Structures are given as structure tokens and as C-alpha cells.
Amino acid sequence: MPERIAERLLTILGDLPAAQAEQLLEYAEFLHARHGGDKEASEPLDIPRPAEESVIRAIRRLHATYPMLDPAKLLREASELMTQHVTQGRAAVEVIEELEVLFHAHYERLAGNKDKA
């Protein structure tokens, strides 16, 4: 990274209130994980759930929250939930809550396997 970018980031970070500095860090970690960084993040990112959210946006948010998870391993279950919402009219709020449980369960399994290694 060019030195001027690093210096500018540090200046901005120093000027931000603590909560916004934490958000900037979370976003930087998200970009790092998404673009070839460490896929083995030890903790999920704290990306808050908006008051109103579509199922698709929830899936995107959860993928960003849990960058260490392999999307292919979640595909079948997440697709089933999406199908229930689209074709069976299941409420988005219910589906999103179940998606959050699904992603968290996959994370717990991954974290549990790392502890045993």
C-alpha cells in the first residue's frame, strides 16, 4: 500500500469517534477477507441487522458477517429457506431469523473443529 494511503487512513481513523472507528475497522476486515485476506477470521464481524431487510440482503449480510464460512457448504440449506420465502410465502422475518441460526451453527461447527485441531 502506498505510504500516502496508509497515512491518510491513520489520520481519518484518529479523527473518528470510537464507534465509527470500530465500523471502519470492521469494514476493512470485511474487504480484507473478501479480497484474498485471511479466510480464517477467528470471530464473526459485527454487522448489525437492519430494521427492514430482504432475504437476499440478509444472505449477503450474513456472508459478510461470517467470511470464514464456505458459501458452497451453506448453499443447499440457504436455498431451501429462500425457496420457502419465494414460493410458499413464508415471512421474510422468519426466514432471516432461521438464516442467522444456520450461519451461526456453521460457524460454531467450524470453530469447534479448529479447537480440536
Image: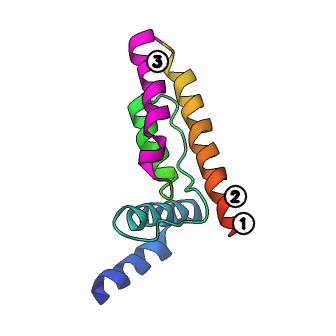
Secondary structure under tag 2 reads helix
Q: Which of marks 3 and 1 is nearer the N terminus?
A: 3
Q: Quadrant of the N terminus?
A: bottom left
Dot 1 alpha-carbon crowd within 10 angstroms: few under 14, some 14 to 19, many 20 or more: few
Distance of label 2 from label 3 (alpha carbons) = 30 Å
Instruction: Please tell me whether residue 76 belongs to the stretch shown in magenta.
Output: yes
Q: Where is residue 35 in the image (x, y as percent from the top left)?
A: 33, 65
Residue 98 falls inside the magenta stretch: no
Q: Which mark is residue 2?
A: none
> Gap in Å between the C-alphas at discs 2 and 1?
7 Å
At 41% from the left and 73% from the top, the residue drawn is: 12
Q: Which residue is drawn at 57% across and 60% down?
A: 19
Helix, strand or loop for the magenta stretch, by majority: helix
User: Which residue is disc 3 drawn over?
Assistant: 84
Counting residues from the start of the chain, the first of labels 2 and 3 encountered is: 3
Q: Which residue is pictured at 46% across the width and 71% down the height?
A: 38
Q: Nearer the viewer, mark 3 or mark 1?
A: 1
* The disc label shown at residue 112, or none: 2
Front disc: 2 or 3: 2
Q: Nearer the viewer, residue 96 or 10?
A: 96
Location of the C terminus by quadrant is bottom right
* Helix, strand or loop under label 1: helix
Magenta residues, as a range? 70-89
Scheme of image coloration: rainbow
User: Up-down: is 82 above or below 43?
Assistant: above
C-alpha separation, residue under disc 3 versus residue under disc 1: 35 Å
Q: What residue type is labelled 2?
A: Gly
* Residue type of the residue flagged with mark 1: Lys
In the image, is residue 37 above or below residue 50? below
| Residue type beneath disc 3 | Gln
- Cβ–Cβ under 8 Å for marks 2 and 1: yes
